[in-house]
Amino acid sequence: MKTRGLRAVLAASFLFLASLLPTRALAQIIDVSPPSLSFPDTVVGQTSAPQTVTVENLDTNVLSITSVTMVAGTEFAVLNDLCTGANLNQNQTCTFDVEFAPIVTGTFADDVSIVSNDPSSPTLVPVDGDGVQPEVTLTPTSLSFGNQLVGTTSATQSVTVENTGTSDLTVTLVDLAVGTEYAIANEDCTTLSPIAPGNTCTIDVEFSPTTTGLLTDDLEITSDAPSSVDIVPLDGTGIQPATQVTPGSLNFGSLAVGNSSVPQTVTVENIGTATLNIGTLTVGTSNYTLTNDTCSNAAVLVGNDCTVDVVFNPTVAGPLPDTLNIPSDAPTTPDTVTLNGTGLNGPVASASPATLNFGNQQVGTTSTTLVAQLTNTGNQPLGITGAPTVVGSTDFAVVN
């Protein structure tokens, strides 16, 4: 009994003394290099180059690695993992890679979690990176050219393309959807690409309408921005004058040479969509003259008109056709008016025969009657104002 009691006392004493000794901490047996990863700016939708992490066993005990995973796992990923399931002896290593693939812009951070038999497991490797992308901002967002005369070219209007994103912008194509009424006069967006964040380029557009009416198109800017193709709507109106000449012809009938007709009026109306600019009105011969001319060298506003009077004054007999020419900037130029009139000679009295020869006649007797015929060979009526008489002799007499 005494021996048992002594042993119990000694055992209790030993345990008490052991409790007073300092406790030895468990040693860390895992080493990670590098301890953290920072990725360069990576364009959204693209994947960075992988970065490698090396894991080493620093202890004499075997290091058993259970898993290597991302804590969040949305923007970063583990690949080429040679560590999961590895049992590393002292100074042995394994590796795994991490890549960064941002799906939106911004700064991102995550941790690689390495679960092992290390006393401090899980071991965390912080990772971070910025997701960047270009962004296109257009100023202005549309171009309106207003009214432009058909067949002419407008002044250029400019669109500024600014990279308001966080990475370089590459413009690959600047084009027009249709390209018949509009043209790209100049652009430096493709030549300046890549365009750094905050920088700009310029596109100059001009309007050359080939027809009247509202004409539209789209300026298309293709780039590596998320929008891919940015569009600037274009609009403008093609305008031009149009003439309506009334009447289309004038007929003056017949008029004696040397006389002048009553004036007849021609009206020129602008029925188009632009001011009508008229040149000098002309006729081809001197048989017609223009008076009260308000059209020559006039600018006739839309919906307005001008007039000119035409007078027929024949210089010779016969049909005398002519044309009134009306030059302008209308597409129908020159407009024409057909002129017709006939010149007439005056009446012409012609006697036949020209002389009457009575021969010898005995004094106191009366000869046989000789007849003279008077004919109007002109083309106007001959007015006879009195009976024929013999002038200069009493030996002759008119009997009928």
Image: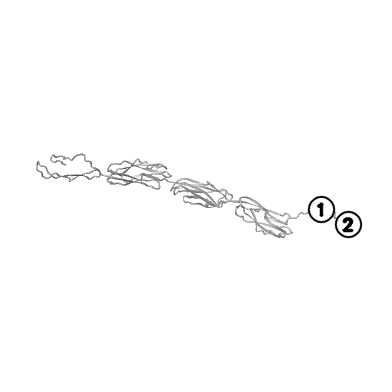
Q: Residues within 10 Å of mark 1 (few under 14, many from 20)?
A: few
Q: Is residue 343 visible?
A: yes
Q: Position of residue 153 (x, y in %)?
A: 45, 48
Mark closest to the chain's N terminus, 1 or 2: 2
Q: Quadrant of the N terminus?
A: bottom right
SS of the residue at dot 1? helix
Q: Which residue occupies the foreground of this view, 27 or 101?
A: 101
Q: Position of residue 7 (x, y in %)?
A: 87, 56
Q: Is residue 311 above or below residue 15?
A: above
Q: Which residue is mark 2?
A: 4
Q: Is residue 126 visible?
A: no
Give the alpha-carbon distance from disc 1 to disc 2, as whole Å.
Answer: 23 Å
Q: Quadrant of the C terminus?
A: top left
Spot the residue most to the right.
2
Quarter of the view holding residue 264: top left
Q: Amino acid at mark 1?
A: Ser
Give the residue displayed 83% in from the left and 54% down from the top. 15
Q: Is residue 152 above or below residue 54?
A: above
